[in-house]
Image (tube, rainbow, N blue to C red):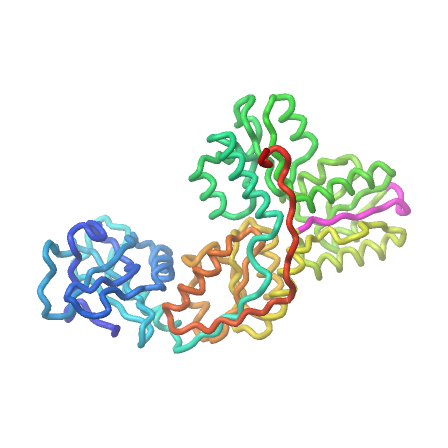
Amino acid sequence: MTDTSPARTPHVLAAGDPGPVPAGAVLVADRLVRTDGADPAEIPCPAADLVAGELRRAGAAVVRGPLPVAAPGSPAPPGAVPAPAGAAAAVLTGTAPPAGIGLVPGPPAGGAESADPAGAARAAFAAWRAAAVPVRTVLLAAPRSFCAGVERAVEVVERALAQRGSPVYVRKQIVHNTHVVADLESRGAVFVEELDAVPEGATVVFSAHGVSPAVRSEAAARGLAVVDATCPLVTKVHTEARRYADRGDTVVLIGHAGHEEVEGTLGEAPERTVLVESAADVAALEVPDPERVSYLTQTTLAVDETAEVVDALRARFPALRGPASADICYATTNRQDALRSIAEDADLVLVVGSHNSSNSQRLVELARRGGTPAHLVDDTGDIRAAWLAGAATVGLTAGASAPPGLVEAVITALGGLGRVAVRERETTRETVRFTLPSAVRQP
C-alpha cells in the first residue's frame, strides 16, 4: 500500500465498525477490510501497536479497530457513514512497500487531546516509515521470559482462585510484571501493599520475592489463610541468613535498597545484617569482628557487578564466608549469558519487562556496558521509532517475569516494518521445575 493523501483517497468507515470515532481521535487500524470485493479481503496491520504508542506519546486520543476501505471511485458500502470531523486513521500494513497510511479528512475538533489528529497521524506514520527496512534480523536470546519460580508463583494464584474463589489477596505484586498482575486482577486477585488491607480470615498469597518473619507473624495474628508463593531460591537465601546470623557472623547482603526481596531477607536477622550495593559501600563498611563476616546476594543481580562487590569484600575481610552455591539464581544467570551471546552482534537490544523488574533492568545495563544501545519495554507500545532507525539487527530478550507472548508480539509488530528474519541463539536449556506449596496442591 502506498502513501496517500486524504484529498486523493478518502476512506469511509462502515457504521458501527469499529464504532464512532470521537472527533479529534486517531483510528489506528488493526487491519484493513476491503469493501469493494477486491482480493485479499483483509490486509493485516501488524505494526498497529507501534503507531498507537507513538500517537499516545504525542498526546493524541487513539481508537483501535478495523478500517473498512474502498478503492478510489468505488461506491461506499451499504450503511457507511462519513468519519466525524477531526477523525483520522493511521495504517501500517507491512506489505511491499512495507508501510502505508490513510487519513480521513476533517477539521480538528476544539478541545480534543490532539489539536491536529491528521497531523499527529502523519507524524507517527513518518517516524515509523523511516524505521522500515526490506529485511530486519532479530537475534532471539534463549533462555528468556518466565523462569520456574515465576511460573510457580503465577500458578499458585491461579489455583488459589480456582479452589477458594474470588477474592484472593496478594501482598505486593506476585511477580514484577504489569501484564501478569493485570491478568490476575481480571480473574479476581486483589493486590495490596500491606496486610492491613486484607480482611481478617481471608486468603493471602505471599509474592515470589518473599517476606520477613514480621510479616508472617502479622498474618498469623490476624488469622489469615496464607499461601506462600516465595521462590524456593529466595527461601534458600533466607535460610542462609538465619544460619549465618545464628553462628555469630555479620551478614553482608548485596542487593538493591527497597527491593521487596531485599526487605524480606533483611528481616530474617535485622540486628546482624547490613546492606551494600556497590564496592564503594564495602570500603565504608565497619563490622564488630572482621573475622566473622559472611555474605549473601539478592537473586536477581548482574553477575559481573556482583563479583566485583564480592571481590571488594574479600579484600577487606580475608576470612569472608559465603554460600556454597551462588545466590544469584540460575534464571538470572542464564538470561544474562544468553543476552551476552547476541548483544555484540546487534545494533539495538530490546528487553521485554516491567520497570520494577530487577532482572530485566540488569539485562538492559549488561547490553549497554557492552556498548550496544538497549531499552526496556513493557510491551510493543513502548517501542520508539527512533531506536529502530538504522538498526538492521535487533537483539531481543525478556526478563524472567515477562510472559513469552509479549516477545512474540514484538516480533509480529516489527514485521509491520518489513520482513523479519528470526535467529534464535540458545546458550542453555532450562529444565528446573518447582513443586507447588501444599496449600494449593490438588488432593
Which residue appears at 29% of the width and 52% of the height? 61
**Does the segment drawn in magenta span residue 297?**
yes
Residue 55 included in the magenta stretch of the image: no
The foreground one among 149 and 266 is 149
Image position of 314 (left or right of 84) = right
**Residue 67 horizontal/vertical position (percent):** 23, 59
Q: Is residue 388 above or below residue 265?
A: below
Residue 28 point in image, percent of width and height: 29, 58
In the image, taking residue 408 as reference, residue 44 lies left or right, namely left
Residue under the point 88% across and 44% down: 292
Residue located 36% across and 64% down the image: 47
Confirm whether residue 34 shows in the render: yes
- Position of the C terminus, as image quadrant, is top right
Is residue 159 shown left or right of residue 107? right
Give the magenta range: 288-299
- Left or right: where 288 falls relative to 380: right
